[in-house]
Amino acid sequence: MIGVVRVALAGFALLALVGAARAEEDNSALLVDLFAKICAPKPSRPSQVERTATGLGFASDGGPITAEMERGAKIDLLYSAKLLRRDERLGSMTAYFAGPDDGPSVTCTVSAVGVSADALPGLIETSLKARERTDKPSNDDNHRLASWRVGAGSGDALDMSVWRTSPHRASISINYYATKR
């Protein structure tokens, strides 16, 4: 009986170690990399976002984007997808396209869990070439908000929201007007 208890305790200890290792996993670089590939290029069409996100392992919450959805004088389309790894939801992304076909307003956001509130701002500045950071006030000391300017001479702003508490959720978002390429 003592052997069974020892094996059970060893199993619980192993589970605790695995859980702690997962909790300490820092997905900050992954979040910045996904944002750099999906949103930073400023896609002008929802289908561009869908192709890129799918190629990176995201699965759409809805059906595929069709050519009919992108036709017409105006676009009004929300694309959302989630990123699963090891059967865990690691992150998600959304892209909202609204307005005239030749220059819709776009809000593109990538989110993840397991992100370091301390590491993320520096990664954004170096990897995304963001400048002129403005820290924003928050109603909660565990929530960090900031905004940067991005792009050569453009007035585009990149926003970050990150929680210091578990599960350490964070998002990076950009708003811009799309232009056909």
Image: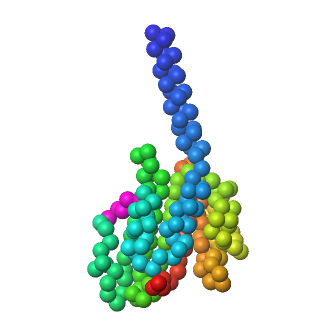
**Residue 168 seen in the figure:** no
Residue at image position (52%, 22%) is 10
Query: Residue 180: where, in percent of width, then height?
Result: 45, 85
Residue at image position (47%, 76%) is 43
**Side of 53 relative to 167 (left or right):** left
Query: Residue 109: where, in percent of width, then height?
Result: 50, 68
Query: Of all residues shown, which one is farthest toward the top?
Result: 1
Image quadrant in which you'd find residue 172: bottom right
In this rendering, the answer to whether 133 lies above or below 181 is above
**Residue 144 seen in the figure:** yes
Residue at image position (59%, 73%) is 158
Query: Residue 108: where, in percent of width, then height?
Result: 49, 72
In this rendering, the answer to whether 150 lies above or below 2 is below
Give the extent of the magenta segment.
58-62
Q: Colour scheme used in the picture? A: rainbow
Residue at image position (50%, 27%) is 12
Query: Of all residues shown, which one is farthest toward the right?
Result: 132
Q: For the N terminus, which image quadrant?
A: top left
Query: Residue 125: where, in percent of width, then height?
Result: 68, 67
Report the predominant secondary structure element of the magenta stretch. Answer: strand
| Residue 161 forms part of the magenta stretch | no
